Image (cartoon, rainbow, N blue to C red):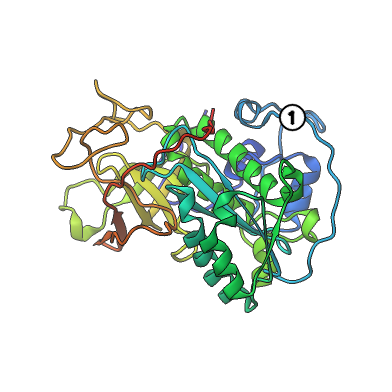
């Protein structure tokens, strides 16, 4: 094996099919798919495989995360305008909360393009706030009003406040019949796709399952940039922007990342970078901005100045100790007045992905030499007696 001596750049290089399979959230990459993507996206630089043509390779993470019963499917007529029909579904509660105490997630899927938006929730009662935020963003980007919202008959959608809001906005609520999940198939399939990708990436990265919120955001980020024959051979983003998306910035989730330390915050002989873990992409920042997790600070940081080593997944050098978490990171001593997921006193909670209805809590956002560190106060966990969903 050749060592990468003098690695000082994060510029994309041609990679093997295995690396791209993992970069794309463990999406199937057979010969036809590789040829198809090469003509539909940019910077899809893939090396020629040494395996014989037609030979199938088995991904252990996919076998663990994707195996399911086979089911027959059929095509259906789709709407012709963006946000004309939006599908939605809630998944949860999860057996393990996120680092910010969410146990549910809600998805909104535009029927025309297939674009997925995912929001983490602490409880189902936050569904209305999530829809209000999605409606504002989607209608602003599309320049059109949502006409139909299609969901199942869950109480989070049929409650008085949600129904009152839909009537005031002139939105028709299409509800699928009881015990008929296939009638809300687009949303159900989107949730299944996200959960399968989450299981595969968590299995591959060996990170704690409490990172599933960041994994879902990464899966949605990837899904929105991949074209599909079901949507006129275009990616969801291309339907919205008219531009063929680039996937050259994608990297393997959980990769060891070297985060640049600005000169203003270090001394002359100090190291110029520190090791972190790649946990996704910052959707609200400029293109090619990565979100990393710093185990020494126990914080998430968004930055463009990173070097990502995709050969090392979820393993940091010099971070193991007698007391370690599931990632092999040393757990810091508790600080007074702060609690972790176990109810023990720990550091502050991590950044939440598009949190609706946060109850008026404000985050403390600090500039760190051009990087943004977001710290949110810990929040109480929402109790539930419903059947829990496992990431296993």
Give the x, y percent position of residue 294.
31, 43
Give the x, y percent position of residue 334.
18, 34
Q: Which residue is at a point 55% across and 39% down the rendered structure image?
A: 198
Q: Is residue 317 above or below residue 128?
A: above
Q: Which residue is at a point 53% across and 40% down the rendered structure image?
A: 92
Count of marks, rendered view: 1
| Residue 248 appearing in the image | no
Outermost residue toward the front? 160
Outermost residue toward the left? 336
Q: Which residue is mark 1?
A: 51
| Residue 231 appearing in the image | yes
Give the x, y percent position of residue 341.
32, 35
> Along the horizontal axis of the image, is 40 left or right of 303?
right
Q: Residues within 10 Å of mark 1 (few under 14, many from 20)?
A: few
Secondary structure beneath disc 1? loop
**Front residue of 288 and 339:** 339
Q: Which residue is at a point 44% across and 45% down the rendered structure image?
A: 279
> Along the horizontal axis of the image, is 18 left or right of 33?
left
Q: Which residue is at a point 23% across and 46% down the rendered structure image?
A: 271
Give the x, y percent position of residue 32.
81, 44
Q: Is residue 387 above or below residue 151?
A: above
């Amino acid at each position: 094996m050749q060592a990468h001596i003098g690695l000082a750049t994060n510029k994309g290089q041609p990679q093997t099919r295995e690396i791209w399979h993992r970069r794309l959230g463990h999406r199937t990459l057979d010969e036809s798919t590789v040829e198809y993507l090469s003509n539909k996206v940019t910077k899809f630089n893939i090396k020629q495989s040494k395996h014989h043509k037609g030979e199938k390779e088995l991904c252990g993470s996919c076998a663990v995360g994707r195996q399911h019963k086979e089911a027959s499917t059929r095509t259906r007529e789709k709407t012709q305008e963006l946000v004309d029909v939006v599908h939605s579904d809630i998944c949860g509660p999860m057996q393990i909360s996120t680092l910010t105490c969410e146990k549910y997630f809600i998805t909104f899927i535009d029927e025309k393009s297939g674009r997925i938006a995912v929001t983490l929730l602490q409880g189902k009662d936050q569904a209305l706030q999530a829809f209000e935020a999605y409606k504002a963003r989607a209608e602003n980007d599309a320049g059109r009003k949502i006409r139909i919202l299609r969901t199942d008959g869950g109480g989070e959608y049929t409650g008085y406040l949600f129904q009152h809001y839909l009537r005031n906005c002139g939105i028709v609520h299409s509800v699928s019949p009881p015990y008929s999940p296939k009638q809300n198939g687009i949303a159900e399939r989107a949730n299944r796709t996200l959960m399968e990708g989450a299981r595969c990436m968590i299995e591959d990265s060996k990170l704690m399952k409490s990172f599933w919120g960041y994994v879902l955001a990464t899966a949605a980020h990837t899904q929105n940039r991949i074209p599909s024959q079901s949507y006129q051979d275009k990616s969801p983003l291309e339907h919205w922007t008219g531009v063929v998306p680039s996937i050259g910035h994608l990297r393997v989730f959980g990769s060891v990342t070297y985060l640049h330390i600005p000169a203003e915050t270090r001394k002359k002989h100090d190291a110029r970078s520190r090791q972190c873990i790649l946990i996704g992409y910052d959707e609200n920042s400029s293109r090619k901005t990565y979100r990393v997790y710093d185990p020494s600070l126990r914080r998430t940081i968004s930055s463009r100045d990173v070097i990502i080593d995709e050969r090392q997944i979820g393993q940091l050098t010099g971070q193991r100790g007698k007391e370690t978490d599931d990632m092999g990171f040393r757990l810091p001593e508790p600080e007074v007045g702060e609690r972790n997921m176990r109810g023990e006193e720990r550091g502050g909670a991590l950044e939440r992905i598009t949190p609706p209805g946060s109850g008026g809590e404000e985050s403390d956002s600090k500039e760190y030499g051009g990087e943004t560190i977001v710290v949110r106060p810990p929040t109480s966990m929402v109790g539930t007696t419903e059947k829990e969903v496992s990431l296993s």
